Image (spheres, grey):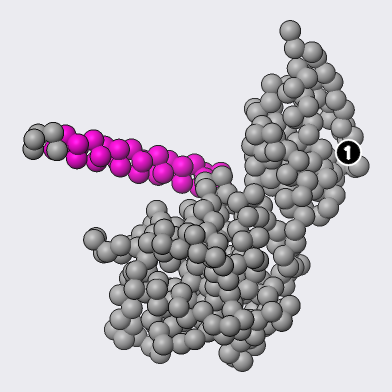
Amino acid sequence: MQQALERQIVFEDHKEAYALLGDRDEFLQVFRENFDCQFISRGEQLEILGEAAEVKMAATLVEELQYLYRQGTTITMHEVRYGIGLVRGGKGEALHTLFGDTILVTARGRHVRPKTLGQRLYLDTIRHNSITFGIGPAGTGKTYLAVVMAVAALRNKEVRRIILTRPAVEAGERLGFLPGDLQDKVDPYLRPLYDALQDILGQDSYQKLMAKGIIEIAPLAYMRGRTLEDAFVILDEAQNTTDKQMKMFLTRLGFGSRMVVTGDLGQVDLPRGVASGLREASQVLKDVKGIGIVRMAPVDVIRHDVVTRIVEAYGAWEEKKKKEKEQRDKQREVRAK
């Protein structure tokens, strides 16, 4: 028979209790769903009763969330659910340091920090490599964190400019057919990069840096023939590059520069039969010194809970179709013999 245990957690005040238990106790309800314990909330105290192992895990989670809150982290459902996964996986101590690495503070005063172990690995890889590949599903923060690191490098005078680019796949990079000047033509494809920069820098600073040419945003086709020195260069949506485009881009790296290449291999929009340059590069360059490759998973998604479940469902569906295709191919081979 398991030993029973009771733990009591005292909150600093009503505000802290509200932050850790959630609006209308929504976080408390998640605690109850994920731990075989009895949770009794009494104003500024929380009692946890049950089998020793479960109580210890639950108490570790609440205490770590309390520590994060007191360090200035806003507790959301992401921190709660991700924390539960870490605690149940025996990595509860990682919560203590995970959210402590502030990369920068945005124009609106928001502290940008890694929110998953995958994101922390991604940021560390960017810091220690000339070229970093960030591969993973939508919502894992690949692009936004790359832009944050670029702005931080600019502020620290590690680079003199920021260059951001994406392949304009839908227009086949034949932008002349679209109305307006170059900026008008590429805006629809580069809008996510504009949005990230404006969120981080604020509208005024963003406009000034763009006007001075310190920040440049352009379609991938305009990178050809250039050598990019003293720059932080980001290639977004790289799953939609061809092998030649990817090689062209990577060989633009100049002295004093860093590159980050981001993409989701589950969202390739290239014509049928055209191989993704990102997929090929991640295989060809995996052992090359100075190049880091980080693969993020659905657990690193920082969006609504439903988004994580959508990513997982599509992943399972694609895996099922892949196995069915392999089975059909084997059956054809058998019949052919």
In the displayed orientation, state which residue is furthest to the top.
1
Residue 194 is drawn in which quadrant?
Answer: bottom right
Residue 57 is drawn in which quadrant?
Answer: top right
Residue 54 is drawn in which quadrant?
Answer: top right
Give the percent coordinates (x, y) of residue 248.
40, 77
Give the percent coordinates (x, y) of residue 1.
74, 7
Write the residue at 33% across / 38% down.
Answer: 320
Q: Main secondary structure of the magenta part?
A: helix
Q: Nearer the viewer, residue 322 or 269?
A: 322
Write the residue at 34% across / 69% down.
Answer: 243
Examine the structure image and report whether residue 330 is included in the region drawn in magenta: yes
The answer to whether residue 25 shows anywhere in this view is no
Q: Give amino acid for label 1.
A: Phe
Examine the structure image and report whether residue 141 is included in the region drawn in magenta: no
The residue singled out by tag 1 in the image is: 11
Depicted 94 relative to depicted 245: above or below: above
Depicted 178 relative to depicted 326: above or below: below
**95 left or right of 130?**
right
Total label count?
1
Span shown in magenta: 304-332
Which quarter of the figure is the C terminus placed in?
top left
Mark 1 residue element: loop
Depicted 81 relative to depicted 294: above or below: above
Write the residue at 46% across / 87% down.
Answer: 226
Q: Nearer the viewer, residue 94 or 300?
A: 94
**25 left or right of 16?**
left
Give the percent coordinates (x, y) of residue 42.
86, 29
**293 left or right of 185?**
right
Give the percent coordinates (x, y) of residue 169.
34, 71
The answer to whether residue 45 shows anywhere in this view is yes
In the displayed orientation, state which residue is furthest to the left.
336
Write the residue at 30% across / 75% down.
Answer: 172
